[in-house]
């Protein structure tokens, strides 16, 4: 039969152009690992589960880098202004609030530094949090086809989400340099500590985004609800006003997950110290725990989601 | 090929539940998520199905050994792609177990992850990374890939300017560099031009000879004869046949024999009650009922008729049909001046095909019974006397016979 025929077969075959002769050797089956799939929940073997998550993070690094570069190139290749679009949102947002403030629509309180710098800093940090929060579902959606058809280290998508958030933040942070110079904001050593709470802020956003992913993929209501509450969420976060230390207004800082790490990051960038240190440590630790939980949720829920929503 | 008896894939009593109702599927999804999070995922065959659910896969068991190429065939919705998704680890079985020894790779939707704005070259790196091939490896073989895809002239143009065939070629040439123990393929070879397809088949044969096992889902069964040795036929979520490809493909052809209900109803309405076709049976040369034949064997069709009154000069028309190709031939008793006067009671007639020239495939008969006049229609029975030609195997590499007939022929030269 043809399949046992070692000779090239059909009329238009050209054996010289096959790529097969230059390939790595086949893995010997005796040494090969055994993969099993069954109906038993993966969460029942947590050590193995975490091992696999770590393995896939390592295995997915190169893919994550490729996808990151792909998205970045794809994002700006068909634009005239290119990377400039990365700077625009916080500038535009800040401009709107500065204008409103100049019209005395709201009062910002005693910021201690120029209020433009204050709002811009808060806006950049808020944008980073929201980028992180929205990116898991954005990435899963834009790679739906790949996720539902191919088996690849899916943790790489989370690495891309993290990478894109950090990249966008880094670009926007550059905006602060001219702002600091123009409004003569004094530089403090505490700036060096700021990356810590900023990372916490991004991790918290990512973890919350990943935790919402399963329900959000099943029910579009989640996405619609988030779009609805985002402006309100921004208002209750102390970006355009000074956070209150007095009870009961200070409660807002405890219930709004975005607030503590954002306030502390801004304090370290602008003032050289903070009164919200304890709050930030609590939320920072919570971010780490939540991140670990979300990784498990992500891994365990993907097969269920692929089956229901992407088949 | 070493240790060719080693099992690479073991699908063991696997079941899969699906739900087609969107709202219900969403709600069940939430509950199943909760169950997975709390470690309560369990064998779904021991609990009742929830409303709207059904088994997309029922108790499937089969194995694939090293160097084997197995075709999963069956009608749409029979469960083939679901099975592939489970083997690929994308969705989990609801009962049973799937074990795979070695590396798995999938050739599904070639070029997944392509970004249309980026160039072919950039996309090779992305697609390779998706499939798990590192940059250094790609650097080494990228020229070969581009050659294989025959895209040297456009490789630095954006992929969105490529034709669909060019994209497939680019996708295949990247995927061709995978060296898994088990390769999963879904319908990918049904596309592309003939020349490139031949190249792909040649490549797959190389892989098989090296000991790679392949499991492939397709509807283009004829094409599969180039590479596959075995078939697993799915019907309604169950495995209905597991064995050689010729038999499997004829069984698959038979499954496509769904009688049209409207035609049947019309025939029934027009039929008279004076004469009936009682039974149609396929026999071998010795007169024994038989289902499977080889090309060149003799087949006898036994048709039992009955009449409630005398019908002079009755006619029977037998149409031999293939579910794939339609009517193959039709013959009437009148053509051979076979005189048939039906008396009240039963009568059996035979139609013999000496040295049947049909090639591998599934076939059946549609039998009609008429009186002497054009308008004397008594009855028609469709899809009767199913039989299969299961051998000898066809050489589908351009060195054998093709189509459905083995015609008497002779090559000659001046």
Image: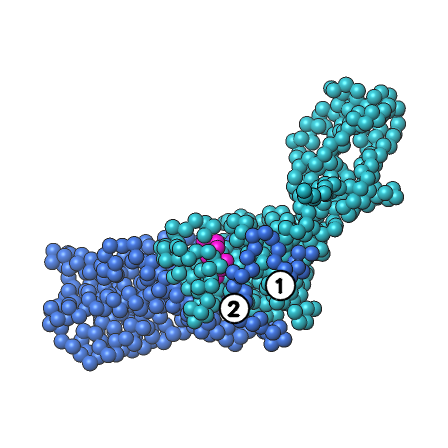
Residue A47 lies in the magenta-colored region: no
For the residue labelled by badge 1, is the local secondary structure a helix, a strand or a loop?
Answer: helix
Q: Colour of chain B?
A: cyan
Q: How many marks?
A: 2
Q: Nearer the viewer, residue B50 or B194?
A: B194
Chain for disc number 2: A
Numbered label attached to residue A22? 2
Q: Are the residues flagged by discs 2 and 1 in contact, CB closer than 8 Å?
A: no
Left or right placement of residue B263 versus residue B119 in this view: right
The residue located at (63%, 67%) in the rendering is B211
Which chain is assigned blue?
A
Residue highlighted by disc 1: B208
Which mark identifies residue A300?
A: none
Which residues lie in the magenta part? B167-174
The image shows residue A25, relative to residue A140, as above or below, that is below
Where is residue B121? Give x, y as percent: 39, 61
């Amino acid at each position: 039969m043809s399949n046992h025929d070692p000779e090239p077969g059909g009329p238009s075959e050209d054996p010289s152009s096959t790529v097969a002769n230059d390939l790595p050797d086949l893995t010997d089956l005796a040494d090969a690992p055994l993969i099993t799939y069954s109906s038993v929940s993966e969460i029942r073997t947590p050590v193995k589960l975490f091992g696999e998550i770590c393995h896939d993070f390592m295995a997915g690094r190169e893919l994550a880098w490729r996808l990151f570069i792909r998205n970045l190139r794809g994002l700006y290749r068909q634009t005239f202004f290119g990377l400039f679009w990365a700077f625009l949102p916080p500038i535009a947002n800040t401009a709107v609030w500065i204008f409103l403030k100049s019209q005395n629509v709201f009062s910002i309180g005693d910021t201690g530094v120029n209020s433009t710098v204050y709002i811009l800093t808060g806006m950049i940090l808020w944008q980073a949090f929201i980028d992180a929060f929205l990116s898991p579902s954005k990435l899963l959606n834009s790679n739906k086809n790949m996720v539902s058809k191919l088996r690849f280290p899916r943790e790489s998508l989370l690495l891309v989400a993290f990478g894109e958030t950090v990249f966008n933040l880094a670009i926007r942070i550059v905006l602060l340099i001219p702002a600091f110079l123009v409004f003569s904001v004094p530089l403090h050593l505490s700036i060096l500590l700021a990356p810590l709470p900023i990372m916490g802020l991004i991790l918290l956003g990512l973890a919350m985004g990943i935790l919402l992913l399963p329900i959000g993929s099943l029910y579009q209501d989640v996405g619609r609800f988030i779009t609805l509450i985002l402006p309100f969420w921004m208002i209750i976060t102390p970006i355009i006003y000074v956070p209150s230390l007095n009870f009961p207004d200070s409660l807002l800082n405890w219930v709004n997950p975005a607030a503590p790490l954002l306030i502390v990051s801004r304090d370290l960038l602008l003032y050289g110290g903070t009164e919200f240190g304890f709050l930030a440590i609590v939320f920072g630790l919570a971010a780490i725990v939540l991140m670990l939980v979300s990784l498990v949720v992500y891994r365990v829920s993907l097969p269920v989601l692929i089956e229901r929503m992407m088949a | 090929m070493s240790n060719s008896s080693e099992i690479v894939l073991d699908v063991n009593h696997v079941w899969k539940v699906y739900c087609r109702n969107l709202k219900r599927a969403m709600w069940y999804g939430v509950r199943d998520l909760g169950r997975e999070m709390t470690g309560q995922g369990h064998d779904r065959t021991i609990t009742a199905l929830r409303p709207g659910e059904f088994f997309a896969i029922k108790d499937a068991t089969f194995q694939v050994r090293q160097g084997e190429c197995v075709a999963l065939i069956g009608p749409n919705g029979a469960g083939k792609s679901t099975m592939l998704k489970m083997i690929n680890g994308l969705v989990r079985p609801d009962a049973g177990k799937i074990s795979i020894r070695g590396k798995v790779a999938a050739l599904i939707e070639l070029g997944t992850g392509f970004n249309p704005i980026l160039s072919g070259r950039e996309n090779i790196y992305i697609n390779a990374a998706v499939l798990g091939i590192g940059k250094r490896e790609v650097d080494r073989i990228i020229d070969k890939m581009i050659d294989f895809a025959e895209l040297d002239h456009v490789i630095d143009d954006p992929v969105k300017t490529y034709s669909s065939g060019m994209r497939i070629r680019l996708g295949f040439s990247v995927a061709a560099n995978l060296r898994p123990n088990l390769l999963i393929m879904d319908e990918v070879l049904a596309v592309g031009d003939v020349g490139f397809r031949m190249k792909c088949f040649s490549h797959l044969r190389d892989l098989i000879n090296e000991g790679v096992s392949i499991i492939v889902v397709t509807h283009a069964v004829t094409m599969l004869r180039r590479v596959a040795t075995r078939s697993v036929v799915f019907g309604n979520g169950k495995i209905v046949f597991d064995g050689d490809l010729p038999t499997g493909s004829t069984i698959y052809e038979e499954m496509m024999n769904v009688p049209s209900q409207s035609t049947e109803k019309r025939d029934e309405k027009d039929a008279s009650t004076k004469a009936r076709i009682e039974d149609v049976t396929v026999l071998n040369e010795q007169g024994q009922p038989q289902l499977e034949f080889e090309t060149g064997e003799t087949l006898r069709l036994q048709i039992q008729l009955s009449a409630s009154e005398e019908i002079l000069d009755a006619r029977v028309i037998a149409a031999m049909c293939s579910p794939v190709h339609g009517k193959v031939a039709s013959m009437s008793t009148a053509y051979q001046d076979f005189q048939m006067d039906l008396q009240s009671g039963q009568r059996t007639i035979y139609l013999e095909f000496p040295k049947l020239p049909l090639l591998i495939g599934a076939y059946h008969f549609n039998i009609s019974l008429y009186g002497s006049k054009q308008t004397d229609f008594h009855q028609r029975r469709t899809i009767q006397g199913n039989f299969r030609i299961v051998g000898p195997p066809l050489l589908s590499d351009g060195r054998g016979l093709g189509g459905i007939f083995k015609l008497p022929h002779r090559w000659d030269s001046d």
